[in-house]
Image (cartoon, helix red, strand yellow):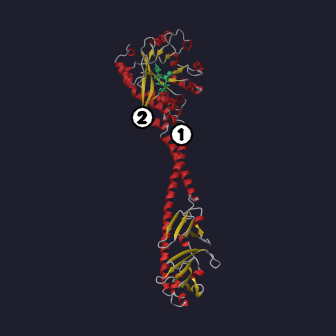
């Protein structure tokens, strides 16, 4: 049963630790997925922004080159000092050359010349309308370059050649965080240039594939982003921290719910508050006349979901959870409510047997509780008998003081379940008991064939010697009753006479003049 499972602190701790670990793992997984998604979105935004930027940049460059081409008939010096030339340099162009019929006629580095373009830049094909090449750095220009040939619209091999130092810094500015990507590259065919690299790299020789690749509109140029594929150290630290915090919180929440909110103590408190406990009364009769002399009050728990919970289970649970004192208070309250009704069916001087746990006997409120309860009973009608097992007598000085005090209050004491403990005989000698309740295991040993019952015989002899009144519990057959009466047992209690009954059933039995009620 769940209540039983959670009554162990160890089980609660283990379950709480398990909940904590599960919550930490779950938080870690959710956070990783969330971070992964946000990084994916961020990468998409970055690459789209850079691509837009590059498209705009090349569109500007295109315009500037077209303008420069219109100056092709002027002398080189005036071309170089023209505003169009200035504009082109503002677009990351490191040098340009004007070409007529495949010959360079004006270069921004050497001025007017007349050399075939293919001699200076063999990689460029001037027959193409647009050619892009990635060139290695040279002694003059150490960084890798992006070379572009743009043919003039009217003549084959007339056009402008520009060499750009692809400064990727503006694009890198899009990356507001170092976690966004590890590398960025401009790609033409199978070649790529990376930032700060002196020569283009053959993409086929690279071990890693780009995480994102996007073409630049209108150009045979692509942009590639590379990421490490794993979350950054910072993200991992964040996930770890979040997991630990979630795990600890969930663990504590689990502990709080199991141990405090839904723990056995809380369950018992709720059960009392919601009237799940009720009382039953089992008649105790005089052995020779079978007339009722009193009742033993027993507690019952009807749980709305679990049904009837055996008293052995919930009494043990209450004792373990230090809830037996509040539970006995509850019993005394319920009994005080029933007492006026009981008074109408039980003869004056009837005994009310109540089971008292050792912890209650030893508690500081014990005497006050008994005084209060006695005061709540109809005056002078009942004799209170407290039933205790020998477990209650371990602290001898305290028990002795309590027993003396009880006797002064007119309350009687019964030693319950006699014969089931280890040291009952010692207690018999030490304490002043009024009743000795013989455990039902002894009684159930009596059957029709039994001629002698040496242990029971010895117990009965002893109690006669100590002038103790004896009560036999668990009497289930007339043979047992007959044997016990013959051997001098004073009172009988058991299913043969009556099951423990609810107050209404006891009243009904009284009405129906059941044998033990008729005098
Ligand atoms: P107990 O004090 O020995 O109570 C007598 C038990 O014997 C009761 O069990 C009763 O139903 C059962 N009984 C009575 N006649 C017969 C019979 O002829 N045959 C058999 N087989 N059993 C019979 P129950 O009610 O299950 O209670 C079990 C134990 O739980 C009680 O044993 C008592 O130690 C404890 N208990 C019950 N109510 C309370 C309570 O309010 N406070 C405390 N501290 N303990 C309680
Ligand atoms: Ca009892
Ligand atoms: Ca008993």
Looking at the image, residue 279 sits to the left or right of residue 80; the answer is left
Residue under label 2: 305
In the image, is residue 316 above or below residue 125?
A: above
The residue shown at (53%, 8%) is: 451
In the image, is residue 272 above or below residue 107?
A: above
**Comes first in the chain, label 1 or label 2:** 1
Looking at the image, residue 107 sits to the left or right of residue 153; the answer is right
In the foreground, 115 or 272: 115
Please provide percent x and percent y for residue 512: 34, 17
Mark 1 and mark 2: Cα distance apart in space: 21 Å
Residue 277 numbered tag:
none
Q: Quadrant of the image for the C terminus?
A: top left
Label 2 residue SS: loop
Label 1 residue SS: helix
Q: How crowded is mark 1: few (under 14 residues within 10 Å), some or many (20 or more)?
A: many
In the foreground, 494 or 307: 307
Which quarter of the picture shows residue 305? top left
In the foreground, 120 or 27: 120
Q: Residues within 10 Å of mark 2 (few under 14, many from 20)?
A: few
Is residue 462 visible in this depiction of the protein? Answer: no
In the image, is residue 452 above or below residue 265?
A: above
Please provide percent x and percent y for residue 432: 55, 19
In the foreground, 228 or 97: 97
The residue shown at (44%, 35%) is: 271
Is residue 66 visible in this depiction of the protein? Answer: yes
Q: Does the residue labelled 2 lie within 8 Å of ligand 1?
A: no
Cβ atoms under marks 1 and 2 closer than 8 Å: no
Residue 12 numbered tag:
1
| Furthest-right residue in this view | 139
Please provide percent x and percent y for residue 486: 49, 9
Which quarter of the picture shows residue 307? top left
In the image, is residue 79 above or below residue 248?
A: below
């Amino acid at each position: 049963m769940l209540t039983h499972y959670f009554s162990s602190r160890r089980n609660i701790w283990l379950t709480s630790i398990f909940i904590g670990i599960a919550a930490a793992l779950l938080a870690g997984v959710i956070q990783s997925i969330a971070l992964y998604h946000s990084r994916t979105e961020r990468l998409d935004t970055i690459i789209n922004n850079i691509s837009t930027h590059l498209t705009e940049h090349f569109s500007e460059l295109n315009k500037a080159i077209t303008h420069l081409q219109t100056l092709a008939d002027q002398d080189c010096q005036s071309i170089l000092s023209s505003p169009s030339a200035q504009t082109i340099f503002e677009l990351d162009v490191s040098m340009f050359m004007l070409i007529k019929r495949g010959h360079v006629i004006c270069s921004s580095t050497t001025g007017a010349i007349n050399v075939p373009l293919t001699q200076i830049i063999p990689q460029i094909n001037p027959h193409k309308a647009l050619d892009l090449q990635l060139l290695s750095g040279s002694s003059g220009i150490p960084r890798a370059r992006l070379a572009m040939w743009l043919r003039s619209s009217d003549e084959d091999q007339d056009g402008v050649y520009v060499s750009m130092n692809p400064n990727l810094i503006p694009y890198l500015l899009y990356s507001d965080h170092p976690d966004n990507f590890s590398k960025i590259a401009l790609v033409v065919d199978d070649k790529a240039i990376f930032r700060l690299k002196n020569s283009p790299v053959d993409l086929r020789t690279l071990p890693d594939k780009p995480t994102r690749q996007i073409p630049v509109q209108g150009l045979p140029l692509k942009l590639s982003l590379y990421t490490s594929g794993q979350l950054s150290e910072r993200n991992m630290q964040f996930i770890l921290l979040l997991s630990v915090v979630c795990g600890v919180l969930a663990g504590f929440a689990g502990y709080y719910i199991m141990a405090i909110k839904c723990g056995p103590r809380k369950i018992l408190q709720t059960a009392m508050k919601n009237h799940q406990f009720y009382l039953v009364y089992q008649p105790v009769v005089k052995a020779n006349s079978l007339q009722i002399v009193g009742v033993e009050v027993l507690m019952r728990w009807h749980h709305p979901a679990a049904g009837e919970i055996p008293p052995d289970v919930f009494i043990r649970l209450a004792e373990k959870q230090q809830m037996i004192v509040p539970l006995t208070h509850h019993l005394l309250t319920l009994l005080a409510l029933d007492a006026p009704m009981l008074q109408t069916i039980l003869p004056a001087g009837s005994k009310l047997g109540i089971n008292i746990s050792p912890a209650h006997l030893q508690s500081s409120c014990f005497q006050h509780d008994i005084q209060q309860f006695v005061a709540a009973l109809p005056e002078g009608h009942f004799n209170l008998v407290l039933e205790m097992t020998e477990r209650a007598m371990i602290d001898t000085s305290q028990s002795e003081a309590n027993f003396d005090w009880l006797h002064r209050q007119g309350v009687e004491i019964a030693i319950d379940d006699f014969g089931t403990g280890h040291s009952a005989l010692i207690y018999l000698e030490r304490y002043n008991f009024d009743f000795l309740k013989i455990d039902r295991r002894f009684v159930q040993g009596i059957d029709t064939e039994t001629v002698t019952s040496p242990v029971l015989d010895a117990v009965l002899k002893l109690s006669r010697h100590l002038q103790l009144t004896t009560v036999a519990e668990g009497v289930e057959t007339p043979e047992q009753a007959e044997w016990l009466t013959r051997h001098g047992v004073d009172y009988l209690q058991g299913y043969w006479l009556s099951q423990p009954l609810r107050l209404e059933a006891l009243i009904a039995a009284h009405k129906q003049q059941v044998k033990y009620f008729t005098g």
